[in-house]
Image (spheres, helix red, strand yellow):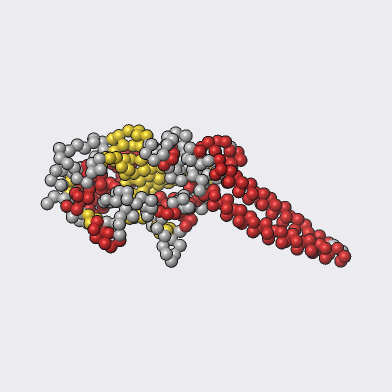
Amino acid sequence: MIDLRLLRDDPDGLAAALARRGLGPDDLDRIRELDERRRRLVSDLDQTRAEQNQASKAIGQASPDERQGLIDAASALKETVTSLESELREAEAEHTAAAARIPNLPDPEAPDGQEGDGVVLRTFGEKPTFDFTPRDHVELMEAGDALDLQRGAKVSGARFAYLKGEGALLEFALVRYAIDVAMEHGHTPVIPPVLVREGAMYGTGFLPTDAQQIFTTRDDEYHLIGTSEVSLAAMHMDELIDEEDLPLRYAGYSPCFRREAGAHGKDTRGILRVHQFEKVELFSFVHPDASKDEHERILSIEEEVFSGLDIHAQVVDIPVGDLGASAARKFDLEAWLPGQEAYREITSCSNTTDYQARRLKARMRVADGDNVLVHTLNGTALAVQRAIIAVVEQHQREDGTVVVPEKLAPYLGREVLFAR
């Protein structure tokens, strides 16, 4: 949630910033009207309660002839207080719901544009070339008995799969490799809950805007996370963190669940876009002055992970029109996938500034000063299924085998996959 004081203190600056994200004057006018109504009701309620207190005191000091009139007046004030309290609850609910849909203010350095308008900042790794027609990951892995899409669909429906044999071993190896890299950079490994309450989803900005993508349990008030960012951010909600304890850095590993609503017919082949997947997620709580540097730091870890896997990829600065609600700026890594002859996203990292912290009430205790909101950042060290695709497609050989990257081989216990 943004700092709504900007509605009053810097309305023009706020309007200009949010216009970059597609919000028009009407959106802010509605928030402003709701804010003014809420504050007016607070003032009216405070004044009426004060009058009610004065009336109650006056009854005890009144003569018998005056008392009934004062009782009637106090009763009327009590009814007014009850009515104003009801109006205020309604106004606050409307105000909160509307404010929750306002996205974070974009970083001034983030490029303008919509999906597909990202700015390529650099590439790394050697782009693979083949003297044969490269296969996609489905053909390679099914031939190696490492992937079973047909039985995944039989058991769970579309966009589910079984990883088996060397496919499963490849996941275990990739996860431990990514966690080791993260630990070298000071991130504490965490296995977080994957079922969370609504407050965690709301606090991280996935509710209400992404409700259609979230799986929810039928009989309990639990949501399945689409990323361990949710659980890691919520670890410190309603907490006051000592300044000297920052930064707090985590590397969470979890299964993740996403409906992929609105993606019907897109990337339906294979395991690029599935409802259940696994990730190693980097997450940081930092001093507000450090968040820009921390963002670059997380990006560098992601690059290190995939450089170590000998993957060719590009770093993309994502345009404001394609940012999630909580992000002020986001970088993606896009790997070249020979099976698609295209660059596709394999990781992302976002600076959410104080947007999540304001919702989560995650603050920093400052010596000799007011407590302030921390900044939160997240980044995907490794999304398992997409990393598998990049590895097997970029390192394939004509006979259908896959060369295991040198840094991954010790984790996997072999140098070649799918050898017959």
Residue shown at the point (44%, 43%) measured from the top left: 327
Where residue 158 sits, quadrant-wise, is: bottom left
Residue shown at the point (79%, 63%) measured from the top left: 72
| Nearest to the observer: residue 104 or residue 24 | 24
**Residue 116 visible:** yes
- On screen, residue 77 above or below 301: below
User: Where residue 77 sits: x, y (%)?
Assistant: 74, 59
Q: How many marks?
A: 0
**Residue 186 visible:** no
Q: Is residue 80 left or right of residue 264?
A: right
Residue shown at the point (36%, 48%) measured from the top left: 281
The single residue placed furthest to the front in the displayed view is: 265
Residue shown at the point (33%, 55%) measured from the top left: 276
| Nearest to the observer: residue 70 or residue 160 | 160
User: Where residue 85 sits: x, y (%)?
Assistant: 65, 58
- On screen, residue 204 above or below 11: below
Where residue 399 sits, quadrant-wise, is: top left
User: Where residue 99 sits: x, y (%)?
Assistant: 54, 48
| Nearest to the observer: residue 53 or residue 92 | 92
